[in-house]
């Protein structure tokens, strides 16, 4: 994921991810960092579960997940490059194991290429690449600048009235008439506050992405230039949500949520989906204090 993608649109987000071989270091908006294992190119995500490297105080540890199908009390073998380095007891219930990076185990993990966690009989339950582990530990040890204070956003009170809307002719005047053979332009409307509504205008022949406009109670609609496209208003949360994909067509990348402060939309939260092949972990890189609403 590029720095440009992380910083596009608005600033005040956490540092960009740090690549360390087959590991990636992510820091949240409070400057807390973890390293996450990546699925190697061509690897099967079901064989490479998400393994986390974290540092709590002076000691680092590797957290390895165990499938819920493994019963409590099962003896698990930890091996590095095929050589057993530890035997542990599964806690059961889908709870994983934490492997401290100390002593013999730490030396094996730092020097090895592949970690495996297996049941008796050799059934591998977890596997991860160790390439870059030492660099990831070093990245976690770097001094981090304290995260800046987050912004405070005051959201105007809810207005129960229906949103202001525009006629089809007014929509066509705003964004242009549809070409011959195209479906009619339409809009979805949402009440933002007592003085403004949000219109998501869809012109089918120009793509499926809705164009956001702010419509005051009187006067002309204006493009919501501070909102990325594509995105959508989430009425239950009173937020405009958008996914900036790291890979086209994939449900991973950067998720952003915006709130209306009475004059413009402002970034309320940003989360990075850590890995496209296994979009199961999100790191909150920015969160504003939102009040009112």
Image (spheres, helix red, strand yellow):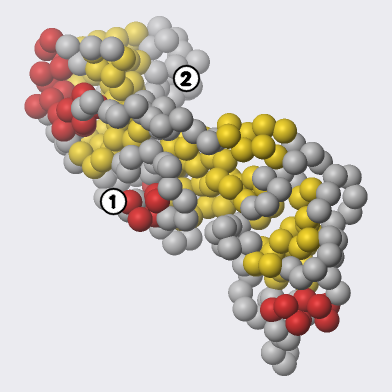
Task: Say which residue appears at 74% left-offset and 58% top-offset.
Answer: 198
Q: Relative to 147, does residue 249 appear above or below in the rendering?
A: below
- Identify the residue under disc 2: 94
Q: Is residue 57 left or right of residue 73?
A: left
**In-front residue for pair 276/218:** 218
Q: Residues within 10 Å of mark 1 (few under 14, many from 20)?
A: few
Q: Relative to 257, does residue 291 appear above or below in the rendering?
A: above
Residue 133 visible in the picture: no
Task: Say which residue appears at 13% left-offset and 10% top-offset.
Answer: 103
Task: Report which quarter residue 141 is drawn in.
Answer: top left
- Identify the residue under disc 1: 42
Residue 259 visible in the picture: yes
Task: Report which quarter residue 28 is drawn in.
Answer: top left
Q: Is residue 169 left or right of residue 133?
A: right
Give residue 58's position: percent from left, percent from top. 23, 12
Q: Is residue 174 left or right of residue 267?
A: right
Disc with the residue nearer the chain's start (2 vs 1) = 1
**In-front residue for pair 22/271:** 271
Give residue 287's position: percent from left, percent from top. 52, 35
> What is the distance, in whole Å, between disc 2 and disc 1 at their CAs?
26 Å
Residue that lies at the very extreme toward the bottom in this rendered image: 180
Task: Report which quarter residue 72 is drawn in.
Answer: top left
Residue 260's tag is none
Task: Say which residue appears at 39% left-offset and 18% top-offset.
Answer: 96
Mark 1 secondary-structure assignment = loop
Q: How many marks?
A: 2
Residue that lies at the very extreme toward the right in this rendered image: 161
Give residue 42's position: percent from left, percent from top. 28, 51
The quadrant of the image that shows the C terminus is top right
Task: Say which residue appears at 11% left-offset and 12% top-offset.
Answer: 104
């Amino acid at each position: 994921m590029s720095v440009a993608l992380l910083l596009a649109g608005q600033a005040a987000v956490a540092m960009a991810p740090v690549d360390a071989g087959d590991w990636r270091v992510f820091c949240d908006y409070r400057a807390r960092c973890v390293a996450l294992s990546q699925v190697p190119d061509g690897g099967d995500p079901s064989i490479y579960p998400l393994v986390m490297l974290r540092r709590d105080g002076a000691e680092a540890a590797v957290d390895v997940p165990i499938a819920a199908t493994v019963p409590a009390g099962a003896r698990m073998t930890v091996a590095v490059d095929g050589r057993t380095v530890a035997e542990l007891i599964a806690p059961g219930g889908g709870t994983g194991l934490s492997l401290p990076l100390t002593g013999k185990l730490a030396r094996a993990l730092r020097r090895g290429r592949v970690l495996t966690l297996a049941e008796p009989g050799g059934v591998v339950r977890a596997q991860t690449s160790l390439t870059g582990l030492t660099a990831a530990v070093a990245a976690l040890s770097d001094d981090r600048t304290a995260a800046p204070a987050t912004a405070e956003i005051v959201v105007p009170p809810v207005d129960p009235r229906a949103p202001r809307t525009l006629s089809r002719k007014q929509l066509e005047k705003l964004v242009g008439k549809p070409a011959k053979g195209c479906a009619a332009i339409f809009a979805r409307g949402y009440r933002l506050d007592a003085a403004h509504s949000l219109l998501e205008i869809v012109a089918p022949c120009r793509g499926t992405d809705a164009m956001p406009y702010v419509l005051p109670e009187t006067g002309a609609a204006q493009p919501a230039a501070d909102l990325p496209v594509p995105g959508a208003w989430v009425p239950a949360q009173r937020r405009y949500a958008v996914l900036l994909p790291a890979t086209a067509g994939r449900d991973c990348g950067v998720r952003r949520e915006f709130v209306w402060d009475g004059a413009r939309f402002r970034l309320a939260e940003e989360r990075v989906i850590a890995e496209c092949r296994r979009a199961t972990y999100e790191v909150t890189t920015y969160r504003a204090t939102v009040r009112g609403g």
